[in-house]
Image (tube, rainbow, N blue to C red):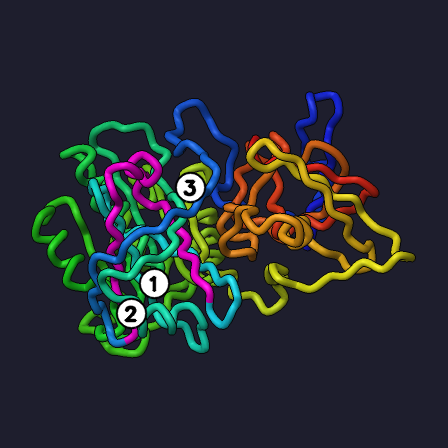
Amino acid sequence: MTATTTADSTTSGAAAPVATDATPIDQTDAAATDSRVIPTRRRARFHSLSVSAVRPLTADSVEITFAVPDELAGKYDYAPGQYIAIRTSLGGEDVRRSYSICQAPVAGELKVAIKRDLGGLFSTWAIDNLEPGMQIDVMSPEGRFTSQVPVRANAHYVAIAAGSGITPVMALIEGTLKASPGNTFSLVYSNRTAMDTMFVDELADLKDRYPARLALYHVLTRERRSSELLSGRLDAEKVRSILDALISPADVDEWFICGPFDLVQLCRDTLAELGVDVSAIRYELFTTDRPDNVTGQTGRPIVPRDDDEVHSISFVLDGTTATVTSPVHSNESILNAALRVRGDVPFACAGGVCGTCRAVLTEGTVDMVENYALEPEELARGYVLTCQAIPTSEKVCVNYDA
């Protein structure tokens, strides 16, 4: 699945998508309108922050709190639903992972939840080793899994989350309910068992604070609940039944979906079948969970030979231009090539999900293998995900500073 993008010389170097073999799902599903509240984009930068607290959530997940010093406060302000990336070196390898901020904005701190992935290099290290007092590199907040409804009273928000997909939703619930005394929030939250449920006590506390404005529907897939409706796997039939019985889609102003790829897809499809406007749906993927997905190429060794046909890749970063060549036969991403000559090129997930590596294509053409992060208006302005952008012209130029 690729999307071909070319620079348009008639728009002062900006680019526009010209062809799509199979359009990947976009994070917001619709072009922006003037009424949308969109967080300001800034170039992601890492700073060393101190771990101030580590708190167990479940047997295989923890909440990490980072202290933000006063001099960095402006660099770490955020909107509910955004994420940070954490960077460390493990076995001599630069390792980065993205984690959603799990609380509404609080001065002087950031909180994220880390769940142990089966075989996960970073999550295992973080859960076993992070402790108060440690310093670690943390990226400034990014992301658009945020409310884009104009601030007003009496808005109804709904989230459908599974497992660790609850982390950004925690911040969204608190943020939207604080924003107006007339706002309401409904959460459908799926887990295997009650013991696997992250933030169960915190959700109960929020319910106590907002008893008439927060509705919680816990769905357990491997435990029988007293309600058959809230027992079993969240498939399309179950989602539709829950909406039919508990939530009226016509009364919802904004939807948030966070979880595995298949769950996000079936929820989007079900909402579309029920007549929900796609512009009201936000979603976020932590991974695509797709066996055919092309993962990031960061650190992939490429050594051009003298007789290779090559792409010439130029990029602007922090006002400085660098150029690197990439063999045509290697199908190397722009990000992988750029990292050979500058180690500070911004990226986090390297899988087309987070959008940290975005840059404006100012010359040439590329194929984007995947795109789960860029908004339609960003594509129209020429942005590409450099971790997924494969050059298709002899010369390609991108600008990270745009």
Residue 93, magenta (yes or no)? no
* Residue matched to label 3: 144
- Of residues 218 and 398, the one drawn nearer to the viewer in this rendering: 398
Q: Residue at x 37, y 66 (%)?
A: 234
Question: Residue 240: horizontal and vertical position, in percent?
Answer: 37, 57
Residue 61 is tagged as 2
Q: Say which of marks 2 and 1 sits in front.
A: 2
Give the secondary structure at mark 3. Answer: loop
Give the alpha-carbon distance from disc 3 to disc 2, as whole Å. 24 Å
Give the alpha-carbon distance from disc 2 to disc 1, as whole Å. 9 Å
Relative to 33, say whether 262 is above or below: below
Give the alpha-carbon distance from disc 1 to disc 3, as whole Å. 18 Å
Give the secondary structure at mark 1. Answer: helix
Describe residue 49's horizontal placement relative to residue 41 as left or right.
left
Q: Which residue of the protein is positioned furthest toward the right in this rendering?
A: 307
Sequence-first disc among 2 and 1:
2
* Residue matched to label 1: 164
Give the secondary structure at mark 2. Answer: strand
Question: Residue 140: horizontal and vertical position, in percent?
Answer: 39, 44
Q: Residue at x 38, y 72 (%)?
A: 125
What crowding class fits label 1: few (fewer than 14 Cα within 10 Å), some (14-19), or many (20 or more)? many
Tell me the kind of residue under disc 1.
Answer: Ser
- Of residues 61 and 323, the one drawn nearer to the viewer in this rendering: 323
Question: Residue 207: horizontal and vertical position, in percent?
Answer: 12, 53
Quarter of the image where the C terminus is located: top right
| Residue 22 appears in the rendering | no
Residue 62, magenta (yes or no)? yes
Tell me the kind of residue under disc 2.
Answer: Ser
Relative to 332, say whether 212 is above or below: above
- Of residues 182 and 103, the one drawn nearer to the viewer in this rendering: 103
Tell me which segment is drawn in magenta: 60-89
